Image (tube, rainbow, N blue to C red):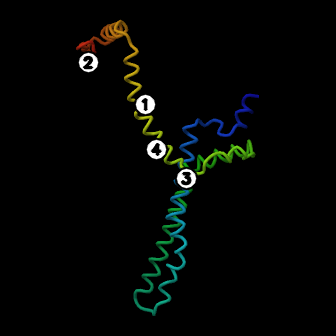
Amino acid sequence: MGTTDSAAQPGAGWNEAQCTAALAQLEQLQVQTHDAQIDDLRLAIPRIIEPFHRPSNPNTFRLYAQGVIGSQNSIKDLHDSWKHPEAQRTFEHVKKSYSANADLAASASIPSHGWAERERREGKSKKSDKSEGVEEISAAISEEDTTRIVEDVQKTFPGIKLETQDNRISV
């Protein structure tokens, strides 16, 4: 019964960081696709047929070929963005989650934008948390524990030289 409950939960199997990263990725994909690639594709046909609105000259075919190649490259870029493995994993997770629970009422309270910025801020805060975490851990070790650890390391690894300076250990 626990397996069924976890499968029915939205985001089952994914932690909050994975969900936030996926939403940020989808937001970036949407922005990238809409702003650059879709707008570029809107110009594909005009770019291809534009050389034929001019009188024929030796450059007509070259301009036509450039328009076709540029449009093909735009379509390929769009295809590559949507077929990227990270995007496909996210889409697959969404399909599984939706098939397990098709009720999307809870998603109405989730903001549709701002995920990329949120992920960027969380990444910065995690980096600063890691450096603070090291200081907190070292402050939690008593002098007796430090001495015992140093002696254990010296016994286990006699080739490593440990020195103490102002109640600090340097390797």
Q: Where does label 3 land, which residue? A: 27
At label 3, the amino acid type is: Glu
Q: Distance between the residues labelled 4 and 3?
A: 13 Å
User: How many neighbours does mark 3 have within 10 angstroms: few (below 14), some (14-19), or many (20 or more)?
Assistant: some
At label 1, the amino acid type is: Asp
User: Is 114 on the left-hand or right-hand side of 138?
Assistant: right
| Viewer-closest of 153 and 157 | 153
At label 4, the amino acid type is: Arg
Most extreme residue toward the bottom is 55
What element does badge 4 sit on? helix
Q: Is residue 62 above or below residue 116?
A: below
Q: Are marks 4 and 2 in contact (CB under 8 Å)?
A: no
Q: Which of marks 4 and 3 is nearer the N terminus?
A: 3
Q: How far apart are marks 1 and 3 (CA)?
A: 26 Å
Q: Distance between the residues labelled 4 and 2?
A: 35 Å
What element does badge 2 sit on? strand
At label 2, the amino acid type is: Ser
Res. 170 mark: 2
- Residue 91 lies, in percent from the top left, at 62, 49
- Residue 150 lies, in percent from the top left, at 32, 10
